[in-house]
Image (tube, rainbow, N blue to C red):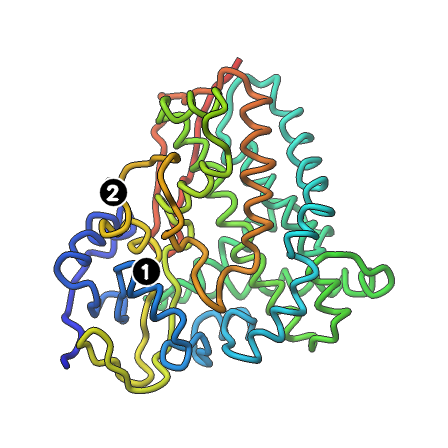
Amino acid sequence: MQAPPVFDVDPSDFHADPYPVYARMRREAPICFVPQLGSVLLTRRDDVFVCEKNIQVFSSHQPQGLMNRLMGHNLMRRDGDAHQAERRMLLPAVAPKTVAAHWRGIFAAHAARLLDELGPRGGADLHAAFALPFAAECLKSLTGLTNMRHQDMDAWSQAMIAGISNYQGDPAVEARCHAATAGIDAAIDDMLPVVRAQPNPSILSVLTAAGLPEDSVRANVKLAISGGQNEPRHVILGAIWALLTHPEQRALLEAGSLGYGQVFDEYVRWISPIGMSPRRVAQAHVYQGIAFEPESRVFLMFGSANRDEAHFAAADRFDATREQSRAVPFGAGPHFCAGAAAARMMIAEVALPAVFASLPGLHLDTREPVRLTGWAFRGVQNLPVRWG
C-alpha cells in the first residue's frame, strides 16, 4: 500500500492537448496525484468503470465542491436514494420516449429554421452560425426557459462551466459564474408562474410539478444548462469536423455503410466532451495498492479512459466503424448521464443529418485553423466551412 505517485503537468499544455499526457499516465502512473490540479487522477478505463460505481468510497456528495457552492445542490452531487429520488422526478422530461415523441419535432424545427437562414450564405463559422444557437434553442425548450435569448443561454452556460472547473481559484471566473446564475434565477422567476399554470414536458415544469423544493429545482435547471449547452455544441462541431477531415468515413456514411449514430458514438469516445468527473473520498480505501485518504479529491478521467489502449486499438484514431461498447463518455453506474437520450437525438438524429443535407458540398475553409481546447470540458471552438 502506498500513496499515489506524484505526476506533474504543465497546465497550459494540458489545456491545449491532454492526450499525450494521458498516454504517459496510463503507462507510468495510471493512478497519480497531480499537484497542479490538487487531485488524484484515475486514467485507465477499467479503474474509472469500477471506482465510479463504488459510491460508498468515491462519493458525488461534495458539500464544499465548486458545483454545490456556485450552482446549488443538484442531483449530480447526491448519492444513493437522494440521487435516485431526484433522478426519477427528472425522468418525465428526458426519458427516451419523451425525447422521441415530444422533443424530436421541436429540435428538428430549430435546426430547419437556422439552416434555412444559413443556406444562401455559402460559408460561415458553424460555431456561431449553427451549433451555438441550435444547442441553445433546444436547451431553452428542454429546460422551459423559453424567455431567454440563445446568446444568454450560451454565455451563462460557459460562465458556469468555467466556474465549476476553476480549481485554481480565479476570482474573476467565480464572479462571472455568480452573474450567470443570477441571470438564470431571474429567468426561472419569470417562467415559474407559466409552467404552474400550464404544465409541459420541460425540466422546470416536471420538477416543479413533482414537488421538488424550489432551491433544488433551480439547482437542477442550472445543472442542465451547464451540461446541455456546452457539450452538444462541442459534439456537433466536432463530429462535423471529424467527417470533413476523414473523407473515407464520410464516404461510408454517404454510401449507407455507416450511420450518424455510429459517428456520434465514436466522436464522444475519441474526444470526450466531458473529460472528467470529480469525486470526494468518503472513507479510507485501498485500490490497486494505492491508499486513498478520506476527504481527498479524485478525478475520474473519462477522456483518458476512452483512449485506453487496452480496450481500443489505435485509440487516437477517429474510426466510426469500430466497436465502441467499452467506452464511457456518459459515465457508468448510477450517475450515467440523465440527458444522454436527448443529446443523442439532438445531435445524431437531428443536427448532423440536417447539416449535411442542407449544406451540399460542405468542406473546410482552410484559411482559418480549427481550434480544440480543454481537458475537463474539451471541444472544437470554431469551424470555418464553405458549401454549394
Q: Is residue 22 left or right of residue 374?
A: left
Residue 99 position, x and y percent, is 67, 49
Is 167 left, or right, of 66 in this rendering? left
Residue 338 in the image: above or below residue 152: below
Quarter of the image holding residue 383? top left
Mark 1: which amino acid? Met
Locate the N terminus by quadrant.
bottom left
- The residue under the point 35% across, 43% down is 270
Q: At 44% across and 78% down in the image, what residue appears?
A: 62
Q: Which residue is mark 1?
A: 301
**Mark 2 neighbour density, 10 Å: few (under 14) some (14–19) many (20 or more):** few
User: Of 184 and 55, which appears nearest the observer?
Assistant: 55
The residue at 83%/65% (across/down) is: 196
As helix, strand or loop, the secondary structure at mark 2 comes to loop
63 lies left or right of 341? left
Residue positioned most to the top = 388
Task: State the residue in front, 96 or 142.
Answer: 96
Tell me which amino acid carries mark 2: Ala
Q: Which dot marks residue 204? A: none
Tag 1 secondary structure: loop
Task: Name the residue tied to disc 2.
Answer: 313
Contact check, label 1 and label 2, Cβ < 8 Å: no
- Sequence-earlier tag: 1 or 2: 1
Number of the front mark, 1 or 2: 2
Q: Is residue 241 above or below residue 291?
A: above
